[in-house]
Amino acid sequence: MTTEPRRFDNAKAAVAAITQLYESSTTRLREAFDAFTKGKDFQHRVRAYYPFLSVGTDTLPELDARTPFGFVADTGTYMTTLTRPDIFSRYLEEQIALLIKNTGAEVEVGESATPIPIHFALGEDYHAEGGLDYGRLAVMPQIFDVPDLTILDDRIANGSDVRSADGARPLALFTAPRIDLSLMRLKHYTGTSARHFQNFVIFTNYQFYIDEFVRLAQTILAKGDGGSLGSGYTAFVEPGNVVTEVEGQTSQTEPPGRHPPRLPQMPAYHLKRADDSGITMINIGVGPSNAKNISDHVAVLRPHAWLMLGHCAGLRNSQMLGDYVLAHAYLRQDQVLDADLPREVPVPALAEIQIAIERAVGRVTGLTGYDLKRVMRTGTVATVDDRNWELRPSTVQNLPFIQSRAIALDMESSTIAANGFRFRVPYGTLLCVSDKPLHGQLKLPGMADSFYRERVFQHLAIGLETMALLRDTDKRQLHSRKLRSFNEVAFQ
């Protein structure tokens, strides 16, 4: 039964109404599905709908020109569908409060025309097809809505002006079904629930960094203090949703997790704070496909920053193994994002991220000014999709590096940065030189093992220090206007 939309001039009340609508809809679907699994035959379709949020304005109040988000670009009606208020309530309250303030209009909350697929209503901890025989599986799509790929795309983020049937413009980058798909995929690929993800995310391409992160997190929780990373950490979550809380604290209300028999494809670890301003670290493995895959899904959580922290090939003979590379430009030869973000679109360096990384390198190494150049170089990072790029003829492989003045090469950084640019997530890259293939120093087992032992701890410490610095940065400054278009959606 459809409920009448309601109008609100208070963000907290609007989020409460969204939560009530969502929980009512998903409860109805879960109860019907439970009856279906027990053999009940339905003579009609069981359907429930996502909540929607909309705002309409025929005037544009004057705003501070520095405002990066929280306002509409033109007069008219704007709308988005919403999901999982248990995860997004804090975010929604912030965004709706800004919308009300900056438009001077009330927001409207009601039931949308977009059905909730049964798989998404059941949540990421339930396998809808599990335990159903072939006959019930065949009938299920006739009773319940299932995910529809025709509405699960990134046209809004990619710049298309996607309007609803009544002509409303998009209010957010992602629709509810697109978000729900990513929440399910995050659980699958990382082994942890989306509710544990924090607002500062580090991607790495080696398990060595994760091992050190786990050790450091356990030390922080035992002491109850993060040192230079700041205090306030409450728990550490590992794959399988295994939660370790600060020593002496027992606030856990969810069922205890269990270590999986084997690690997922891209395991995630979360050093949590109560306001979600902690650090999530994910081992994405090697290659641009993995980098695009995981960042496609993390983006729906609207983090405040993500950072690529990994190894690279140094392309200059003047570089030493263990030197750092701070990317200020990207040579995109990864190809995986060409259809979404053409290669001719520049991916700029973000001043706030660059400054934080450089400060973090200085703090951890103890070097400043010109001395910092002994261990860190700023320049273009090339990202390729072929791990054995060195086997190409040198006249073919070297020309793009020469023309772009590239100083380092890897297989993930440009993808992570380009997807950050595409999804309006502040991004940065700090790599560590682990080999110099153009100069006779190949990545071989003995060299690699020695390098990993000596450099991993310092490199990770720089990444964590960077995130601590960014956490203290004003969000309005961090979410730079460079990331947003002239006809941008209102939500951050």
Image: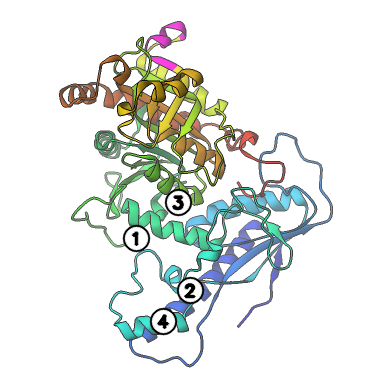
> For residue 26, which numbered disc appears in the image?
2
SS at badge 2: helix
Which of the 4 image quarters holds residue 164?
A: bottom right
Q: Residue at x 81, y 48 (%)?
A: 60
C-beta proximity under 8 Å, tags 4 and 3: no
From the viewer's perspective, is 211 left or right of 85? left
206, above or below 120, in the image: above
Please report the residue visible at 41 percent of the width from the left and 7 percent of the height from the top.
371
Q: Which secondary structure, mark 1?
A: loop
Q: Residues within 10 Å of mark 4 (few under 14, many from 20)?
A: some
**Residue type marked 3:** His
Q: Earlier in the sequence, mark 2 or mark 3?
A: 2
**Circle 2 Cα neighbour tier, 10 Å, few/some/many (<14 / 14–19 / ≥20):** many
Can residue 373 be found in the magenta stretch? Answer: yes
Q: Amino acid at mark 2?
A: Thr
The residue sitting at the right extreme is: 59
Q: Nearer the viewer, residue 158 or 246?
A: 158
Tell me whether the residue at label 2 lies in contact with that at label 4, contact meaning CB atoms closer than 8 angstroms: no
**Residue with the mark numbered 1:** 253
- Residue on which disc 4 sits: 140
User: Which is more N-terminal, label 4 or label 2?
Assistant: 2
Position of 459 with respect to 472 (left or right) is: left
Does the image show residue 359?
no
Which mark's residue is nearer the viewer, 4 or 1?
A: 4
Q: Which-is-in-front pick, marks 2 and 3?
A: 3
